[in-house]
Image (spheres, helix red, strand yellow):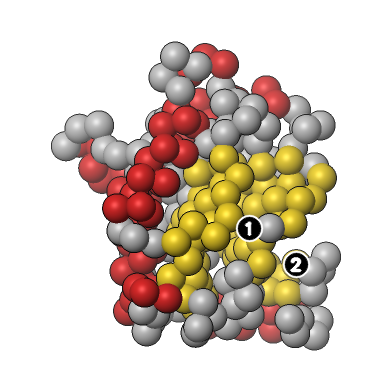
Amino acid sequence: MTLLAEKRPGEDRRVVNELSSSPAPECFARNNYYDRTHSINAAKLLPGEYHVATCDILQVTVLGSCVAACIRDVKLGIGGMNHFMLPDVESAESSFGGARYGTYAMEVLINHLLKLGARRENLEAKVFGGGNVLPGLTQANVGHKNAAFVLKFLATEHLRVAARDLGDVHPRKVYYFPATGRALVKRLHTMHNTTLIERETDYRRKLVQAPAGGVIELF
Protein backbone atom coordinates (compact mmCIF):
# COMPACT_ATOMS: atom_id res chain seq x y z
CA MET A 1 0.00 0.00 0.00
CA THR A 2 1.29 3.45 -0.89
CA LEU A 3 0.74 5.97 1.90
CA LEU A 4 0.25 9.65 1.16
CA ALA A 5 3.16 11.98 1.86
CA GLU A 6 2.51 14.37 4.74
CA LYS A 7 0.97 17.66 3.66
CA ARG A 8 0.31 20.94 5.40
CA PRO A 9 -2.85 20.75 7.59
CA GLY A 10 -4.82 23.10 5.35
CA GLU A 11 -4.00 21.03 2.30
CA ASP A 12 -5.00 17.82 4.09
CA ARG A 13 -8.44 19.17 4.92
CA ARG A 14 -8.90 20.42 1.36
CA VAL A 15 -8.09 17.02 -0.14
CA VAL A 16 -10.52 15.15 2.09
CA ASN A 17 -13.25 17.76 1.82
CA GLU A 18 -13.06 17.59 -1.97
CA LEU A 19 -13.41 13.82 -1.71
CA SER A 20 -16.63 14.06 0.29
CA SER A 21 -18.09 17.14 -1.38
CA SER A 22 -20.32 15.21 -3.78
CA PRO A 23 -24.05 15.22 -2.97
CA ALA A 24 -24.82 12.85 -0.08
CA PRO A 25 -27.32 12.50 2.76
CA GLU A 26 -26.81 14.55 5.91
CA CYS A 27 -25.53 11.41 7.63
CA PHE A 28 -22.43 11.38 5.40
CA ALA A 29 -19.39 11.79 7.70
CA ARG A 30 -17.52 15.06 7.15
CA ASN A 31 -15.22 15.05 10.18
CA ASN A 32 -11.90 14.98 8.32
CA TYR A 33 -8.33 15.17 9.57
CA TYR A 34 -4.78 14.04 8.79
CA ASP A 35 -3.78 10.89 10.69
CA ARG A 36 -0.07 11.29 11.47
CA THR A 37 0.23 7.78 12.91
CA HIS A 38 -0.65 6.20 9.56
CA SER A 39 0.47 9.18 7.40
CA ILE A 40 -2.82 9.39 5.56
CA ASN A 41 -5.94 11.55 5.22
CA ALA A 42 -8.74 10.25 7.40
CA ALA A 43 -12.48 10.52 8.00
CA LYS A 44 -13.85 10.01 11.51
CA LEU A 45 -17.35 8.53 11.75
CA LEU A 46 -19.69 9.37 14.60
CA PRO A 47 -22.68 7.17 15.49
CA GLY A 48 -25.35 7.38 12.80
CA GLU A 49 -22.91 8.33 10.03
CA TYR A 50 -21.37 6.62 7.01
CA HIS A 51 -18.54 7.41 4.61
CA VAL A 52 -17.38 6.25 1.17
CA ALA A 53 -14.10 6.86 -0.65
CA THR A 54 -12.67 6.35 -4.12
CA CYS A 55 -9.06 7.11 -3.13
CA ASP A 56 -6.50 6.05 -0.53
CA ILE A 57 -7.94 7.24 2.79
CA LEU A 58 -8.47 5.98 6.34
CA GLN A 59 -11.92 5.62 7.89
CA VAL A 60 -12.10 5.54 11.70
CA THR A 61 -14.82 4.96 14.29
CA VAL A 62 -15.30 3.82 17.91
CA LEU A 63 -17.85 1.12 18.74
CA GLY A 64 -19.50 -0.13 21.90
CA SER A 65 -22.77 -1.95 21.31
CA CYS A 66 -22.91 -0.26 17.89
CA VAL A 67 -21.83 -2.07 14.73
CA ALA A 68 -19.78 -0.85 11.77
CA ALA A 69 -19.87 -2.55 8.38
CA CYS A 70 -16.89 -1.94 6.10
CA ILE A 71 -17.79 -2.76 2.49
CA ARG A 72 -15.66 -2.44 -0.64
CA ASP A 73 -15.48 -3.43 -4.29
CA VAL A 74 -12.40 -5.67 -4.28
CA LYS A 75 -11.61 -4.94 -7.93
CA LEU A 76 -12.07 -1.16 -7.98
CA GLY A 77 -10.88 -0.35 -4.47
CA ILE A 78 -14.01 1.71 -3.79
CA GLY A 79 -15.17 1.26 -0.22
CA GLY A 80 -16.90 2.68 2.81
CA MET A 81 -17.94 2.30 6.41
CA ASN A 82 -21.11 2.90 8.42
CA HIS A 83 -21.84 3.08 12.17
CA PHE A 84 -25.31 2.19 13.47
CA MET A 85 -26.85 1.82 16.92
CA LEU A 86 -30.03 -0.20 16.40
CA PRO A 87 -31.04 -2.84 13.83
CA ASP A 88 -34.21 -1.14 12.62
CA VAL A 89 -36.68 1.64 13.33
CA GLU A 90 -39.02 1.02 16.22
CA SER A 91 -41.80 3.34 15.04
CA ALA A 92 -42.82 5.61 12.22
CA GLU A 93 -41.52 8.60 14.21
CA SER A 94 -38.07 7.04 14.67
CA SER A 95 -37.69 6.42 10.94
CA PHE A 96 -36.16 9.89 10.74
CA GLY A 97 -33.11 8.52 12.57
CA GLY A 98 -31.35 7.80 9.30
CA ALA A 99 -28.10 5.87 9.45
CA ARG A 100 -28.31 5.28 13.19
CA TYR A 101 -30.55 2.33 12.18
CA GLY A 102 -28.99 -0.71 10.54
CA THR A 103 -31.47 -1.15 7.69
CA TYR A 104 -30.93 2.38 6.40
CA ALA A 105 -27.21 2.43 7.22
CA MET A 106 -26.56 -0.68 5.13
CA GLU A 107 -28.73 0.41 2.22
CA VAL A 108 -27.34 3.95 1.99
CA LEU A 109 -23.74 2.68 2.10
CA ILE A 110 -24.23 -0.01 -0.54
CA ASN A 111 -26.28 2.24 -2.81
CA HIS A 112 -23.66 4.99 -2.63
CA LEU A 113 -20.93 2.51 -3.58
CA LEU A 114 -22.99 1.27 -6.53
CA LYS A 115 -23.52 4.85 -7.72
CA LEU A 116 -19.75 5.29 -7.73
CA GLY A 117 -19.36 2.30 -10.04
CA ALA A 118 -18.97 -0.62 -7.64
CA ARG A 119 -20.54 -3.92 -8.69
CA ARG A 120 -22.57 -5.95 -6.22
CA GLU A 121 -20.85 -9.23 -7.18
CA ASN A 122 -17.47 -7.70 -6.29
CA LEU A 123 -18.44 -6.48 -2.83
CA GLU A 124 -16.94 -7.88 0.36
CA ALA A 125 -17.71 -6.91 3.94
CA LYS A 126 -15.86 -6.76 7.23
CA VAL A 127 -18.01 -6.19 10.32
CA PHE A 128 -17.12 -5.08 13.83
CA GLY A 129 -18.69 -4.16 17.16
CA GLY A 130 -21.82 -5.36 18.92
CA GLY A 131 -20.12 -5.55 22.33
CA ASN A 132 -22.13 -6.00 25.52
CA VAL A 133 -20.86 -2.77 27.07
CA LEU A 134 -24.13 -1.37 28.42
CA PRO A 135 -25.06 -3.11 31.71
CA GLY A 136 -28.32 -1.20 31.91
CA LEU A 137 -29.33 -2.61 28.52
CA THR A 138 -28.31 -6.24 29.13
CA GLN A 139 -31.88 -7.47 28.89
CA ALA A 140 -32.37 -5.68 25.59
CA ASN A 141 -29.02 -7.14 24.41
CA VAL A 142 -28.53 -4.36 21.89
CA GLY A 143 -25.04 -5.44 20.87
CA HIS A 144 -26.10 -9.01 20.11
CA LYS A 145 -29.08 -7.80 18.09
CA ASN A 146 -26.89 -5.46 16.06
CA ALA A 147 -24.39 -8.22 15.33
CA ALA A 148 -27.12 -10.70 14.37
CA PHE A 149 -28.77 -8.09 12.17
CA VAL A 150 -25.68 -7.23 10.14
CA LEU A 151 -24.81 -10.89 9.49
CA LYS A 152 -28.38 -11.68 8.45
CA PHE A 153 -28.52 -8.63 6.19
CA LEU A 154 -25.29 -9.57 4.43
CA ALA A 155 -26.39 -13.17 4.02
CA THR A 156 -29.73 -12.08 2.56
CA GLU A 157 -27.95 -9.76 0.12
CA HIS A 158 -25.42 -12.51 -0.74
CA LEU A 159 -22.47 -10.34 0.23
CA ARG A 160 -19.33 -12.16 1.36
CA VAL A 161 -18.10 -11.55 4.92
CA ALA A 162 -14.30 -11.47 4.70
CA ALA A 163 -13.73 -10.78 8.42
CA ARG A 164 -15.70 -10.23 11.60
CA ASP A 165 -15.03 -9.19 15.18
CA LEU A 166 -18.40 -9.12 16.94
CA GLY A 167 -19.70 -9.51 20.48
CA ASP A 168 -17.61 -9.81 23.65
CA VAL A 169 -17.70 -7.13 26.36
CA HIS A 170 -15.07 -4.68 25.10
CA PRO A 171 -15.51 -1.51 23.05
CA ARG A 172 -13.44 -1.24 19.88
CA LYS A 173 -11.78 1.38 17.76
CA VAL A 174 -11.77 0.44 14.06
CA TYR A 175 -9.41 1.70 11.35
CA TYR A 176 -10.39 0.80 7.79
CA PHE A 177 -8.44 1.40 4.58
CA PRO A 178 -11.07 0.97 1.82
CA ALA A 179 -8.55 1.14 -1.03
CA THR A 180 -6.88 -2.09 0.16
CA GLY A 181 -9.48 -3.62 2.49
CA ARG A 182 -7.03 -3.59 5.40
CA ALA A 183 -8.65 -3.21 8.83
CA LEU A 184 -7.14 -2.62 12.26
CA VAL A 185 -9.08 -3.12 15.48
CA LYS A 186 -8.16 -1.83 18.93
CA ARG A 187 -9.81 -3.56 21.87
CA LEU A 188 -10.37 -0.87 24.49
CA HIS A 189 -9.47 -2.78 27.67
CA THR A 190 -8.10 0.11 29.70
CA MET A 191 -10.49 2.95 28.87
CA HIS A 192 -12.97 4.47 31.31
CA ASN A 193 -15.94 2.32 30.36
CA THR A 194 -18.37 4.50 32.33
CA THR A 195 -17.79 7.28 29.80
CA LEU A 196 -18.72 5.06 26.85
CA ILE A 197 -21.70 3.63 28.73
CA GLU A 198 -23.01 7.11 29.47
CA ARG A 199 -22.48 8.20 25.89
CA GLU A 200 -24.10 5.16 24.30
CA THR A 201 -27.04 5.50 26.65
CA ASP A 202 -27.39 9.18 25.73
CA TYR A 203 -27.11 8.21 22.06
CA ARG A 204 -30.54 6.67 22.23
CA ARG A 205 -31.65 10.29 22.26
CA LYS A 206 -28.93 12.00 20.24
CA LEU A 207 -25.67 11.32 18.39
CA VAL A 208 -22.44 11.66 20.36
CA GLN A 209 -18.73 10.94 20.00
CA ALA A 210 -17.04 8.05 21.86
CA PRO A 211 -13.46 7.82 23.28
CA ALA A 212 -10.56 5.67 22.04
CA GLY A 213 -7.47 3.60 23.05
CA GLY A 214 -6.26 -0.05 23.26
CA VAL A 215 -4.21 -2.81 21.57
CA ILE A 216 -4.15 -3.45 17.80
CA GLU A 217 -5.34 -6.65 16.12
CA LEU A 218 -4.95 -7.00 12.34
CA PHE A 219 -7.63 -8.37 9.97
Amino acid at the residue labelled 2 = Asp
Which part of the image, by quadrant, shows the N terminus?
A: bottom right
Residue 128 at x, y = what percent? Answer: 57, 47
Residue 37 at x, y = what percent? Answer: 83, 65
**Can residue 83 be seen from the camera position used here?**
yes
- Residue 111: quarter of image: bottom left
Amino acid at the residue labelled 1 = Val
Chain-order first, disc 1 or disc 2 = 2
Cα–Cα gap, marks 1 and 2? 10 Å
- Residue 148: quarter of image: top left
- Residue 194: quarter of image: top right
Q: Considering only vertical position in the picture, is 214 above or below 108? A: above
Element type where label 2 sits in the image: strand
Q: Considering only vertical position in the picture, is 100 above or below 81? A: above
Element type where label 1 sits in the image: strand
Which part of the image, by quadrant, shows the C terminus?
A: bottom right
**Can residue 104 be seen from the camera position used here?**
no
Are discs 1 and 2 less than 8 Å apart at CB?
yes
For residue 60, the mark is 1
For residue 35, the mark is 2
User: Dot 1, crowdedness within 10 Å: few (<14), some or many (≥20)?
Assistant: many
User: Which of these two is toward me, 115 or 195?
Assistant: 115
